[in-house]
Every structure is written in structure tokens, then in C-alpha cells.
Image: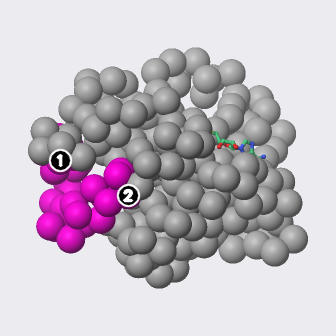
Amino acid sequence: MNQRAKDLLKKGASELGLELTPAQLNALDLFAEELKKWNRKINLTAITDDEGIAVKHLVDSLSLLKAVHGPGRMLDIGSGGGFPGIPVKVVQPDLEIVSVDAVVKKISFQKQAVRLLNLVGFDALHVRAETLAAQYAGHFDWVVSRAFSDIPSFVAMALPVLKDGGRIVAMKGKSVAEEVTAAEAELEKLGARVECRHDFTLPGSGDARSLVILVKK
Ligand SMILES: C[S@@+](CC[C@H](N)C(=O)[O-])C[C@H]1O[C@@H](n2cnc3c(N)ncnc32)[C@H](O)[C@@H]1O
């Protein structure tokens, strides 16, 4: 990434309360370069400029750390090009992460990024999230997603693999209040409820963001 993008990443993370080490900054830069390289051949993201990747992918992914912390097990559903899971793993290595996507080429990219960054305890799996319960029932402390689906569909996939006392975190943009209200009846039927919501502005862009945190009832 160019120097301006690196500065935006460092400053944005700092505004989230995360002081990135030079090694973490290097790893995130390496990841961004690999993303751009693969994106010329396969469609991983519509955001292709360095500043956009720094803020809208990297800083945005790291904002999850307002709600999630290590040690523990985290599942990232519908992770695409590795967001939020890979940036989160770089900064919070004591989280064991399973990252799933239904599209094999996206998982091939994630596996390459894991090799390149030497990430230990990060499994990228080519599966549909609906099939995870057979292997991972009650396994995860956190089940997260970004830009994945409506809240009830996500929660229906997350609940079977969530540990008792675990948290589900949906990373959302604007209009979240309406979405949460519309989801209430469905969540009740599924046996989940919204525990809390963190609304904030994404550092470096000023865009509205929200982390919706849900628990089993
Ligand atoms: C809009 S992308 C978001 C990617 C990434 N989380 C991000 O924020 O950049 C949604 C992803 O969910 C994946 N997906 C959709 N349905 C899925 C399912 N049932 N199980 C696993 N992945 C799924 C798609 O292949 C796609 O990569």
C-alpha cells in the first residue's frame, strides 16, 4: 500500500484503541498487496485503491475488536476475501479462527494469505455455513459476520455452533436500528436476543458502523 494508506491504517487502528506494531503493519500491508494481486484475476472486492482497502477493509475489520477479544474460538461466516477474520487474526493472534465461505476461489485466496503471513490457528474452509453444526456444535465463543445476510438468517446459522455463554456479532452499516427492530420477532422464535449494540463512525471515513451483539436466550 502507498504511504498515505499505511498512515490511514495506523491512525484508524489507533482511534479504535489499537496501537499496531511494525510487524502487524507489515503483515496487513502484505495481505493488502496479495489481495490486489489476486483481485486482478478473481473478484474478491470492488474496493481496489490502497486508501479504500486500508480504511474500508482493514480498519473496518479491526473495529470488530471492540466486541471480540482473545483467547477464544471465533467463526467468521461468509468471509469472502478474509474479512474480518484475517486482519483480526493478525492483531489478535490468540484467537483461534475458522473462516468459511461458499466460494472455493475465495477460500483459496485465504489459504494463500494464511501461508504468506504464517498465521497459526486460522482455518479457511470451503463450506456452506449451514453444514457446520455436524462438526462444530457448541464450539465457538464468537460467531461473527460482515456484509453477510440479514440478522435472523445469520443468527439461525450461528446458534447451533455457539458455545453456551458465547456471543454472535453482526457487523453492520447505517440503518441498523430499523433492521434490529424488524428482526425482533424472528429472533424471539429462534431463541436469541440482542444483548447490546455499539454504534460508531469508522475512523478515516466517518461512515456509520454498528456492531450488533446477540446471545442465546
Ligand atoms: C458480500 S460477501 C462479504 C465478504 C466479507 N465478509 C466482507 O465483508 O468483505 C458475502 C460472502 O458470503 C458468502 N456466502 C453466502 N452464503 C453463504 C453460506 N451459506 N455459507 C458460507 N458463505 C456464504 C459469499 O460467497 C460471499 O463471499
Residue 159 left/right relative to 173: right
What is the number of callouts on the image?
Answer: 2
Q: At which x and y percent is residue 174? A: 46, 21
Left or right? Give the position of 175 relative to 62. Answer: right
**In the figure, residue 160 lies in which quadrant?**
bottom right
Image height of 49 relative to 42, above or below: above
Q: Mark yes or no: residue 14 visible.
A: yes
Q: Residue furthest front?
A: 41
Disc 2 marks a residue whose amino acid type is Phe
User: What's drawn in magenta, residue-wise?
Assistant: 6-33
Residue 145: mark in rendering: none
Secondary structure of the magenta portion, mostly? helix
Image coords of residue 156 (percent x, y): 78, 47
Return the residue nearer the eye: 133 or 167: 133
Q: Residue at x 79, y 33 (%)?
A: 186
- Report x, y in % for residue 74: 56, 66
Q: Which residue is mark 1?
A: 6
Q: Residue at x 76, y 72 (%)?
A: 136
13 part of magenta stretch: yes
CA gap, disc 2 and disc 1: 12 Å
Q: Position of residue 117 (x, y in %)?
A: 39, 71
State which image quarter holds ligand 1. Answer: top right
Point 26% across, 27% down: residue: 205
Amino acid identity at mark 1: Lys
Can residue 95 be spotted in the picture?
A: no
The label number, if any, that marks residue 31 in the structure image: 2
Residue visible at 60% across and 72% down? 123
